[in-house]
Amino acid sequence: MKLSTQHLLGIKDLQPEDISLILSTAEQFKDVLQRPVKKVPSLRDVTIVNLFFENSTRTRMSFELAERRLSADTLNFTASASSVAKGETMLDTVNNILSMKVDMVVMRHSASGAPHFLAKHINAAIVNAGDGINEHPTQALLDAFSMREKTGRLQGLKVAIIGDIMHSRVALSNIYLLNKMGAEVTVAGPPTLIPKYIEQALNVRVEYNVKKALQWCDVANVLRIQLERQNQPLFSSLREYSLAYGINRRLLESLGKEIVVMHPGPINRGVELDSDVADGPSSIILNQVENGVAVRMAVLYLLANREN
Ligand code: NCD
């Protein structure tokens, strides 16, 4: 089976069959990663450039590791250490890199739509590693993989996405994916951080009371407040946010049922999530990180394979 798209720009463009294919391929790669020899020759002779125009820890390391495990040749580019700082345009930078015969580009950029722009101008396969407040497709795929691994299903699963929905590319990609795979989604958080008309636009429920959202859900995906993307205050203080919307052990225990807690990282401990929850038995946060490598291997492998 092959993917229906040449690039992975967003979950919005994928068919449910594409998502199932990526998740099942990732399961095979997860098995490979349990072996003593974790490397496979699948992408030998494929050259991948990691273009990071915006800060990243987990996502970048996860892509780099996935590429190495697949035996690809890789190049790393960090905008702050490059000629972008000397005024070169993104397209010039990328064309220069591509003239060195690069097959795939993994790209993170603070401008929404940057990878889509690039896809119109170059031939290499592009993987969006996060574009502004638009999408972060591999995060949604690894979240789905981790939810399915823990609960056994996506169809009919009740997922609450909690926090800064407005500025979160993780939220948008998760909503697209969960809708396509038959899960139910509620978004929860302060009214100022939830886009107006999101119910109709994206087919989700909205809940302003976090406890009610937690009582409803099987899985809570908790997001960071993206202060760097807010140019005006949208709530009074982090302390008040934490009091009204933060998740701590006492709140979880008051639900009278078990739920799964997720977070894409980086966590602001004591704000959206307390340490006793982040490090507690309900949390699958480190499983998400582990699964990220297998899921990114699957994406790179399937996109490279499509071109053969
Ligand atoms: C997220 C991101 O950068 O979009 N982190 C990640 O990739 N794991 C979420 C965030 O920054 O809060």
Image (cartoon, rainbow, N blue to C red):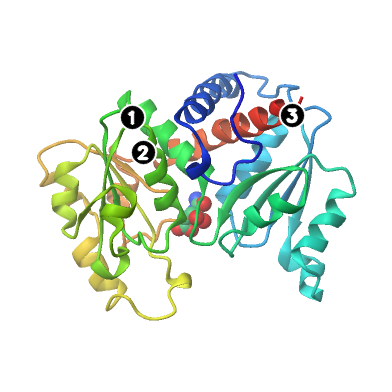
Crowd class of label 3 (few under 14; some 14 to 19; many from 20; radius 10 Å): few
Q: Which of 36/213 is in front?
A: 213
Q: For the C terminus, which image quadrant?
A: top right
Residue 35 horizontal side relative to residue 159, left or right: right
Q: What numbered label is drawn on residue 307?
A: 3
- Residue at the far right: name it: 100
Q: Secondary structure at mark 3?
A: helix
Q: Earlier in the sequence, mark 3 or mark 1?
A: 1
Q: Is residue 304 left or right of residue 154?
A: right
Q: Nearer the viewer, mark 2 or mark 3?
A: 3
**Horizontal arrangement in the rendering, residue 223 relative to residue 33 (left or right):** left
Q: Read off the residue under disc 2.
A: 178
> Which element carries disc 1, helix, strand or loop?
loop
Question: Residue 154 shows which numbered tag?
Answer: 1
Q: Residue at x 77, y 61 (%)?
A: 91
Compare residues 258 and 113 and report the one nearer the observer.
Answer: 113
Specify the amino acid type for callout 2. Answer: Leu
Where does the image place residue 48, in percent across and percent down from the top left? 76, 41
Mark 2 falls on what kind of element? helix
* Residue nearer the viewer, 137 or 237: 137
Q: Are marks 2 and 1 in contact (CB under 8 Å)?
A: yes
Q: Earlier in the sequence, mark 2 or mark 3?
A: 2
Indicate if the residue with disc 1 has its beta carbon within 8 Å of ligand 1: no
For label 1, count other residues whose C-alpha is less than 10 Å away and answer few (under 14), some (14-19) or many (20+).
many
Q: CA distance from mark 2 to mark 1?
A: 7 Å
Q: Amino acid at mark 3?
A: Glu
Mark 3 vs 1: CB contact within 8 A = no
